[in-house]
Structures are given as structure tokens and as C-alpha cells.
Image (spheres, rainbow, N blue to C red):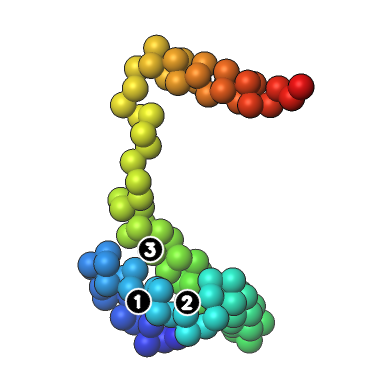
Amino acid sequence: MQRFAAAVAKETDFRRVSNLCDEMFRRFGGVAAFAKLWVNEVKAAAAKQAGTSRAIKSMLAVLNLQAMVQPHQAANPYSELTDEQLREVLQFKIHSACRDDIQF
């Protein structure tokens, strides 16, 4: 885990970070298994060395990963629409949802 953390901390290329994360999650049995292990490590560090910065550094690592991924998320398809256009989209979606829910 320390090797992974060191590699990600130095990396500036999003694709490389994504590949490192995919590999790390695969090795640890998936995202949920990794998260469980991470929580256990943070709890153990806090119990062993209360008041140290280890838990904070762990949380900062997650925030850094999130910040690196953030610019690469898909753009909001509605962000460029005018209020009138948004109203039309909403009316269409509501009308479609109501029509689909009507059962005879």
C-alpha cells in the first residue's frame, strides 16, 4: 500500500493515476474491500498513536485523488441551457414520466 501511495503522490498524469487505482483496487479485491481495509488501518493508527496526523493524511490522500479526477468528469449536459430551455426539458421529462406511469 505504501508503494501505491508513493507512486500516486508523485504522479501528475490522470490516466496513470487511474491505472494505478484500478490495479490497486483489483489487488485488494475491489473498492469496497479496499475501503474496509483503509478504515481499519486508520482506526489502528489512531488507536496506536492518538493525535498524530496519520488519519488526516489518509483523508487528504482521498481528497487529492478526487481533485485529480474532478476535471475529467463528464460535463453537465444542462449547464449551457437557458432557463426556457431547461423548463422545456423538465416539462418533457415530467410529461414522459407521467405518461409512462399511467396504467390501464
Q: What residue is shown with label 3?
A: 64
> Residue 33: x and y, percent?
59, 77
**SS state under label 2:** helix
Q: Quadrant of the N terminus?
A: bottom left
The kind of residue on which mark 2 rests is: Phe
The kind of residue on which mark 1 rests is: Leu
Residue depth check, mark 1 versus mark 3: number of the one nearer the observer: 1
What residue sits 33% from the left and 60% below the top? 68
Tell which of 43 and 21 is nearer to you: 21
Q: What residue is shown with label 2?
A: 25
Q: CA distance from mark 2 to mark 3?
A: 17 Å
Residue depth check, mark 2 versus mark 3: number of the one nearer the observer: 2
Q: Earlier in the sequence, mark 1 or mark 3?
A: 1
Looking at the image, residue 49 sits to the left or right of residue 62; the answer is: right
Q: Bin the neighbour count of mark 1 within 10 Å (Cα to Cα): few under 14, some 14-19, many 20 and up.
A: some
Q: Is residue 51 visible?
A: no
Q: Which mark is residue 70?
A: none
What residue sits 55% from the left and 81% below the top? 29
Tell which of 68 and 95 is nearer to you: 95
> Residue 50: x and y, percent?
62, 79
Q: CA distance from mark 1 to mark 3?
A: 14 Å
**SS state under label 3:** helix
Tell which of 34 and 86 is nearer to you: 86
Q: Quadrant of residue 49?
A: bottom right
The kind of residue on which mark 3 rests is: Asn
**SS state under label 1:** helix
Looking at the image, residue 74 sits to the left or right of residue 91; the answer is: left
Q: What residue is shown with label 1?
A: 20
> Residue 28: x and y, percent?
52, 83
Q: Quadrant of the C terminus?
A: top right
Q: Earlier in the sequence, mark 2 or mark 1?
A: 1
